[in-house]
Image (spheres, helix red, strand yellow):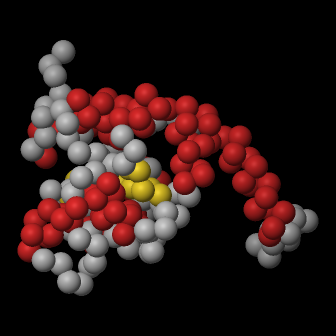
């Protein structure tokens, strides 16, 4: 590997080792604080929800298999970056448009260039939660609203205004559902 001349691994060896390490780590991944509360709240109120991830399905399943009390709430509405229907990865909008269809919005359309007024109106109802810059761009290209919850290091490199995010939060715990026309969390 040219960037690390002191490492005697070939690119293929590196990829193999990295994948093995990830395969061990994925099943221990934990939800971000506030994620289960939000997902279970939306599901309880019958708000259509879906997962739209750029991850390969194999990795998604490794990451979420132990978290089915949360990911089971999506009712199978999961679109991964390597699904056959997703022709272009983020920052293209494909994954979000297919996820909207999975969530029960067949009238969302699939293209970017020839979008009817009805498709635009349906897309505008979508609310994307993203941590990656390419995902923010993809969500906006899909015509949806985007809440950006970046890693602090990433947030220091760019701004929500540059990306077009509609809201930026430090944590999912800071999300206020009613500010987006969703049912409020119950008062404790």
Which image quadrant: the C terminus? top left
Closer-to-camera residue (149/122): 122
Closer-to-camera residue (186/47): 47
Is residue 131 shown to the viewer in this render? no
The structure residue drawn at horizontal position 43% and vertical position 28%, both measured from the top left corner, is 69
**Image spot of residue 76 (x, y percent):** 40, 44
The structure residue drawn at horizontal position 23% and vertical position 29%, both measured from the top left corner, is 44
**Image spot of residue 39 (x, y percent):** 31, 36
Which image quadrant: the N terminus? bottom right
**Image spot of residue 176 (x, y percent):** 18, 38
Is 180 above or below relative to 52?
A: above
Is 38 above or below relative to 166?
A: above
The structure residue drawn at horizontal position 28% and vertical position 73%, both measured from the top left corner, is 110
In the image, taking residue 16 as reference, residue 159 lies left or right, namely left
Task: Name which quarter of the figure residue 53 lies in.
Answer: bottom left
**Image spot of residue 51 (x, y percent):** 38, 50
Is 185 above or below relative to 179?
A: above
In the image, taking residue 129 as reference, residue 127 lies left or right, namely left
Is 20 above or below relative to 177?
A: below
């Amino acid at each position: 590997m040219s960037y690390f001349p002191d490492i005697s691994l070939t690119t293929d060896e590196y990829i193999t080792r990295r994948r093995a390490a990830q395969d061990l780590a994925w099943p221990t991944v934990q939800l971000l604080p506030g994620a289960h509360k939000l997902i279970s709240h939306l599901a309880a109120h019958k708000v259509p929800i879906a997962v739209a991830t750029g991850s390969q399905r194999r990795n998604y399943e490794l990451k979420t298999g132990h978290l089915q009390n949360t990911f089971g709430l999506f009712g199978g509405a999961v679109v991964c970056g390597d699904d056959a229907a997703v022709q272009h990865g983020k920052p293209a909008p494909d994954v979000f448009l297919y996820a909207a269809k999975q969530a029960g919005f067949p009238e969302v359309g699939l293209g970017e260039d020839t979008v009817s007024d009805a498709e635009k109106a349906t897309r505008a109802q979508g609310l994307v939660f993203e941590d990656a810059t390419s995902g923010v761009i993809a969500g906006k290209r899909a015509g949806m609203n985007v809440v950006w919850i970046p890693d602090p290091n990433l947030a220091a490199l760019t701004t929500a205004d540059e990306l077009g995010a509609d809201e930026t939060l430090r944590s999912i715990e800071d999300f206020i559902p009613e500010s987006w026309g969703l049912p409020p969390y119950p008062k404790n």
